[in-house]
Amino acid sequence: MNRTLRIAVAGLFLALLSPLSSAQGNRPSYDPLTQQRSSKQKDGFVDSTLNRINPCDTDYGQHLDDGRRVVLQKTIESAYFWSNIVSLGLLGCLFIIIIYQHRAQRSREWSAAEMLAQYKHSLSLANGQVDEATQRNCGLMEALTLLRESALRAQALPADMLDHPRVPAPRSRAASTPPLPASPAKDTAVKPTAASTVSAAPAAQSGNQIGLFKPEVDLVMKVNSLEQQLGRSRDEAKLLRRQVNEAGQRAQAEEQKNRVLKGE
């Protein structure tokens, strides 16, 4: 029963819908009212979206043009703006110059400190060399005085020997021995030997004198060489003192430059 009832109700519903659909199909296609309604619906949707986006109906292009015009008037067309830009540029340039001068002064101070340290080191080395040279000079002077004293003593010894000449030994022996009685041949033989001893004595004295003068010549040569070394050492000492003075003058000049740079 329920199934048959459902089928009957569906058939009645279809029967009622069929004339309505046929009436709608016979209606003409051109209907201005429907078109106006559809256009109004479309315009209403676009307007609604635009109203949501721009509810005050403002012209953003005009606003952009007005803002651009105001910016141009207040920047490019304004003298106050250009004066501010020039002053800011000058301040930036002065700041850069101050930083550059500070760095340059610091580098100069470092270089001056390094130069002063080098001068101080070289001055200490020069002072050490001067001390060594003075010690050498003192040693050379002492050696020179000793050699001069020894030379004077050696020169005094030959003079004493010349003042007190030695008597030859054969002559003393001959004088000490008494004359023996002998043949005249033996007497003639003894006389030439005495004469030969007398002639040999001056030759021995001259040889002894030459042997005594040889150490004097050596001493004179040594003295001359020591004097030359002393002169060289004095020249070296003068050169070192000159270098020390130049280094001191350079150091004073660098200190004065640093004071001038610091503004003292």
Image (cartoon, rainbow, N blue to C red):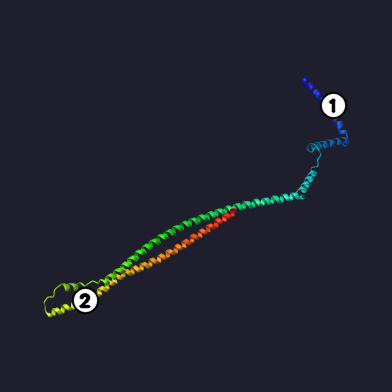
Decide which of tag 2 and tag 1 comes sooner along the chain.
Answer: 1
Mark 2 vs mark 1: in front:
2
The crowd level at tag 2 (other Cα within 10 Å; few <14, some 14-19, many 20+) is some
In the image: residue 224, left or right of residue 109: left
In front of the other: 127 or 177: 177
Q: Using the image as rendered, state which of residue 255 and residue 46 is in the foreground.
A: 255
What amino acid is at disc 2? Val
Please tell me which residue is depicted at 50% across the width and 57% down the height of the picture. 119
Which residue is at a point 51% across and 58% down the rendered structure image?
248
Residue 185 visible: yes
Instruction: From this view, report whether residue 173 is shown above or below residue 249.
Output: below
**Picture coordinates of residue 60 (x, y %)?**
79, 42
Image location of residue 250, percent across then percent down: 53, 59
The quadrant of the image that shows the N terminus is top right
Residue 233 image position (x, y, % from top left):
42, 63
User: In this figure, which residue is indicated by the disc labeled 1?
Assistant: 16
The quarter of the displayed image where residue 24 is located:
top right
Rendered residue at 73%/50% (across/down): 83
The residue labelled by disc 2 is: 198
Q: Is residue 31 visible?
A: no
Residue 36 occupies which quadrant of the picture? top right
